[in-house]
Image (spheres, grey):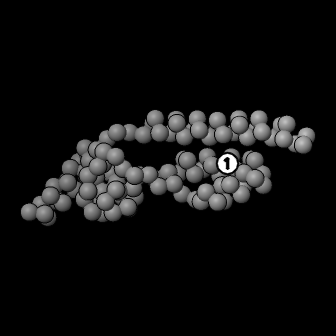
Amino acid sequence: MEVLRWLIPLLAVVAIFVMGARAVLSLSRSEESLICTTCGAQTDTPHTKTRGSVVIEVVLWFALIIPGLLYSLWRQSTRQKVCPACGNATLIVANTPDGRKLAEQFSGRKR
Ligand SMILES: [Zn+2]
């Protein structure tokens, strides 16, 4: 089991790297109020949707380390904010001229 001697520390390093990248990305996430252009729902806590699949990620990791690493980074960097109400990735910042106009439109529609 000579292979395990370097494989386990390598996997540990990579796991720490991926966790770090994830932490950095979540720190840079803004806490602005967002409005959905599809349904008009407003939220401060959008859901996130990660592209790609966990299965492919795991297969790549087991087959080859580098593509697995790149795939993990791609998935983390392409995470999208999605509307908690309708699930569309059509959220814009509410505190902008467009966002305010949209909020007015949607609140006017309800009345
Ligand atoms: Zn929506």
Q: Say left or right for 102 vs 67.
A: left
* Residue 2 visible in the picture: yes
Write down the quadrant of residue 38 in the picture: bottom left
Q: Amino acid at mark 1?
A: Leu
Q: Quadrant of the C terminus?
A: bottom left
x 36%, y 50%: residue: 46
Name the outermost residue toward the left.
Answer: 111
The reply, left or right, for residue 74 in relation to residue 29 is right
Q: Residue at x 68, y 46 (%)?
A: 69
Q: Residue furthest front?
A: 1
Mark 1 nearby-residue class (10 Å; few <14, some 14–19, many ≥20): some
Circle 1 SS class: helix
Left or right, residue 36 beside residue 19 = left
How many numbered tags mark residues here? 1
Q: Label 1, on which residue?
A: 70
Q: Is residue 32 above or below residue 101?
A: above
Q: Residue at image x 66%, y 55%?
A: 57
Task: Evaluate whether residue 93 shows in this view.
Answer: no
> What residue is shown at x 38% (from left), y 61% (from top)?
87
Residue 32 drawn at (x, y percent): 31, 41
**Whole-percent x, y for residue 19 in the image:** 59, 38
